[in-house]
Amino acid sequence: MADVTIQGFQKFYGSVEVIPPLDLEIRTGEFVVLVGPSGSGKSTLLRMIAGLEKIDAGTVSIDGEDITGRDPGDRDMAMVFQSYALYPHMTVAENMTFALRMRGTGDAVIRERLTEALRMLSLEGYENRKPAQLSGGQRQRVAMGRAIVRQPRVFLFDEPLSNLDAKLRARTRLELRELHDRLGATSIFVTHDQIEAMTMADRIVLLDHGRIQQIGSPREIYEEPRNRFVASFIGSPE
Ligand code: ADP
Ligand code: MG
């Protein structure tokens, strides 16, 4: 569980400022959704938090501890991407525990965390299958399992449901949100889909051109859009 504090985050690609100086505070246990149109800077911002993208100015802290200079693997965060990039030659169990093995985590701990993650994700009995022998939804859950076994302080999601068909996506939204609640996790979830944001978020951060247009609960955003952009993006009455 963790507070994440972002102060003065700024990013240029060449001479283009894609993230103007930005502050954001995420509280322990929250499910925060970063939403906005394509190109609004959501992935860039998430990758800056993860340490996967160089930041041009600003700091990020977890629980008051500045982690700006740390390597991605050293931040106590786990990221789930749109393309799950599971290793095709490895089993479900091997995919889920690979990162732990690389860190030298002991066999007993690995076994315990794997068993628990398989149970949480309803993947018991699938641990010896290869990714090609799974449905799209199951593959998505394996990607989730890979993050869970690391027991990170913060989960980062970049459009993890975008490859699923509409029906499965709607169900997986609810499952993912329930999982967050059960784990007592802190999650930052990126999507371009306002319905996903409205149904999953404790708080929505609405981005446009790298700027925060509004932060609020789904209800606040819907009922009191601060400007025309928010109203039209969310589809609330003006
Ligand atoms: P989103 O995830 O909201 O779709 P991105 O964070 O991917 O947006 O992109 C934000 C802006 O930065 C866009 O204008 C995009 O074209 C630009 N951008 C992203 N990555 C790069 C890059 N590696 N080089 C140059 N421009 C980039
Ligand atoms: Mg993106």
Image (cartoon, grey):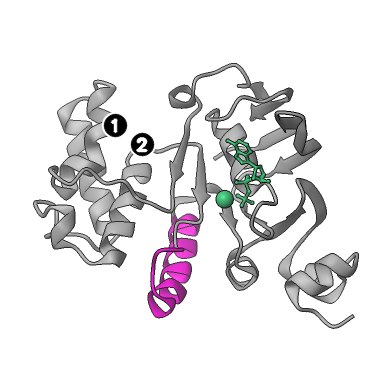
Quarter in which the C terminus is drawn: bottom right
Residue at 29% in and 31% down: 99
- Position in image of residue 155 (x %, y %): 50, 44
Range of magenta residues? 162-182
Residue at 67% in and 28% down: 60
Tell me, yes or no, whether the two marked residues, 2 and 1, touch with CB atoms within 8 Å. Answer: yes
- Residue that sits furthest to the top in the current view: 69
Measure the C-alpha gap from mark 2 to mark 1: 8 Å
- Position in image of residue 2 (x %, y %): 59, 37
Tag 2: amino acid: Arg
Asked if residue 49 is among those painted magenta in the image, a careful observer would answer no
Tag 1: amino acid: Ala
Helix, strand or loop under label 2? loop
Q: Is residue 189 left or right of residue 166?
A: right
Q: Is residue 164 left or right of residue 37?
A: left
Q: Which mark is in front, 2 or 1?
A: 1
Q: Which residue is mark 1?
A: 99
Asked if residue 105 shows in the view, the reply is no
Secondary structure mostly seen in magenta is helix
Quarter in which the N terminus is drawn: top right
Helix, strand or loop under label 1? helix
- Sequence-wise, which precedes: disc 2 or disc 1? 1
- Position in image of residue 47 (x %, y %): 56, 37
**Residue 137 lies in quadrant:** bottom left
119 and 169: which is toward the camera = 169
Q: Which residue is mark 2?
A: 150
Asked if residue 30 shows in the view, the reply is yes
Residue at 43% in and 25% down: 73
Q: Is residue 11 left or right of residue 126?
A: right
Check the image and report above or below for 35 versus 151: below
- Residue that sits furthest to the left in the current view: 128
Residue at 82% in and 66% down: 230
